[in-house]
Amino acid sequence: MPLPPLIETFRRAGQSQVFAFFEQLDPAGQRQLLQEAAEIDLAEVDRLTRTLLTGSASAGVPFADLTPAPYEALPAQGGEAAAWARAKAAGEEELRAGRVAAFTVAGGQGTRLGYDGPKGTFPVTPLRHKPLFQVFAEKIQAAGVRYGQPLHWFIMTSHQNHGATVAFLEEHRYFGLDRARVHCFRQGRMPAVDFAGRILLETPGTLALSPDGHGGSLRALERSGALDLMRREHIETLSYFQVDNPLVRCVDPAFIGWHRLRGSQMSSKMIPKAYPEEKLGHFCLLDGRLVVVEYSDLPLAMQRETTPDGQLRFRAGSIAIHMLDREFIRGIAAGGEGVALPFHRADKKIPTVDAAGRPVKPAQPNGVKFELFVFDAQPFAAHPLVIETSRADDFSPVKNATGVDSPQTCRDDQLRQFARWLRANGAEVATDASGRPHAGLEVSPRFGYDEDSFAESWGRLSPRPAITDGLYLDCNPP
Ligand code: UTP
């Protein structure tokens, strides 16, 4: 029987190893391998091999030309309070008009956390142990109620976790959201290659494929039809956030308003880095364009530079919260001359097979994964904008099983936030020096998902509960 033409195409591209075990597979296995292979853009793999692997890779960032990016400082940090108030009012108007949707990227592999299951199903809240997806769902629902306009929620999954994600949301009835407004779609995959650019097999009948990075969200939004759905629903802008950060304001009126009033196509939030080595990307200007330079790329000496007032010079840390305009996303997804996102290379230990088809679990990196990063879209945006946010109200990711950015630090940060909100509204809450309450508390996002919504619910509450261990505030007064 003649071999399928795709096999010949791979052979001519120097990738014949992909089909090394083809003849040993049963017909279903052969079909699956051919299907996976058909997903691969061989020209792209070849280009990435030449530019990122074997060739004289690009010259890299000309560090001497980098300057810190400007940003809109919070009023408490010297920003203009009236401008922030105008932005907030404009953002509220966008929400009332239904022109904004929430967007969670949840296609990552979560290897550092080492949790078995989609990260969005990981329990994070201090008392009720609500999973990340529930926290976001309740925030999105509450914001919809507050602005009289239920929000759409887009969730990007991966091939690996799509089924489990949808099943989880179904099982929990979308945590009270209208399921017609929750849209899960898969991101794309990229093949892993060895250091010579040869595509790796994970098993004799499957390719080593992995998600194409959070930057893959832009093309996945287009490919999945999400952008068309947005147009039909008159949604202009996505509020982008990561699945691992329950503190995030899923839709933040001030951020939305700044983005809209400036006519920005893509905006980002920054926090001042806590210390020079903190693992956050840096917002910088390069030839007048806004870029993010990763912590692993910016020389340490530059990360440590200070200004005369003692602040870090490159202090604007990226926390992966963005506003993205629909038609801007479409343009990036279409790619083309000068607007395509660049791939990044990550050297990894990639499970594969040896020449006899036996499994190999490498102890050292044996190959490369290619990923797109969403912040690389920023230089292509018209009027890009960075605004400051307060870490305590927007950022406490769950990345690692222990230590920094772990479930424990995230729980503590949630507790501090609840205590701050209570105290700001006159409640007596005993805390330690870091602001962490002695009592275990939890505020449901339906009761308060930010300072304002909390204050409104608390103001209506009568009688007010004592702040005791185990206090859980939900929209139905206890
Ligand atoms: P991370 O960079 O933390 O990666 O993703 P990760 O895969 O979740 O975790 P590790 O590195 O394996 O431990 C940041 C955000 O981007 C999403 C993640 O789901 C998370 O919300 N992401 C990352 C995607 O949606 N797709 C990807 O391909 C990569």
Image (cartoon, rainbow, N blue to C red):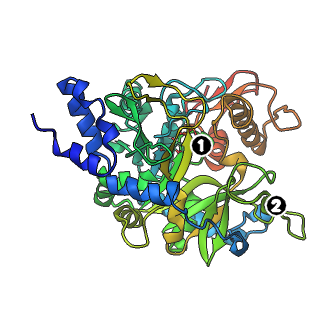
Front residue of 398/429: it is 398
Front residue of 293/4: it is 4
Q: Is mark 1 within 8 Å of ligand 1?
A: no
Q: Where is residue 242 in the image (x, y as percent from the top left)?
A: 54, 45
Residue at x-position 51% and y-position 46%: 195
Q: Name the residue under label 1.
A: 449
Residue at x-position 75% and y-position 37%: 416
Q: Residues within 10 Å of mark 2 (few under 14, many from 20)?
A: few
Residue at x-position 45% and y-position 56%: 48
Q: Where is residue 190 in the image (x, y as percent from the top left)?
A: 40, 46
Mark number, residue 15: none
Q: On the image, which quarter does residue 269 sit in?
A: bottom right
Q: Where is residue 240 in the image (x, y as percent from the top left)?
A: 50, 52
Q: Which residue lies furthest to the bottom in this view?
A: 288
Report, in whole angstroms, how far the alpha carbon at label 1 lies from the one at label 2.
39 Å
Q: On the image, which quarter does residue 411 sit in?
A: top right
Front residue of 313/418: it is 313
Q: Where is residue 279 in the image (x, y as percent from the top left)?
A: 71, 48
The earlier-in-sequence mark between 1 and 2 is 2
Q: Name the residue under label 2.
A: 301
Amino acid at the residue labelled 1: Tyr
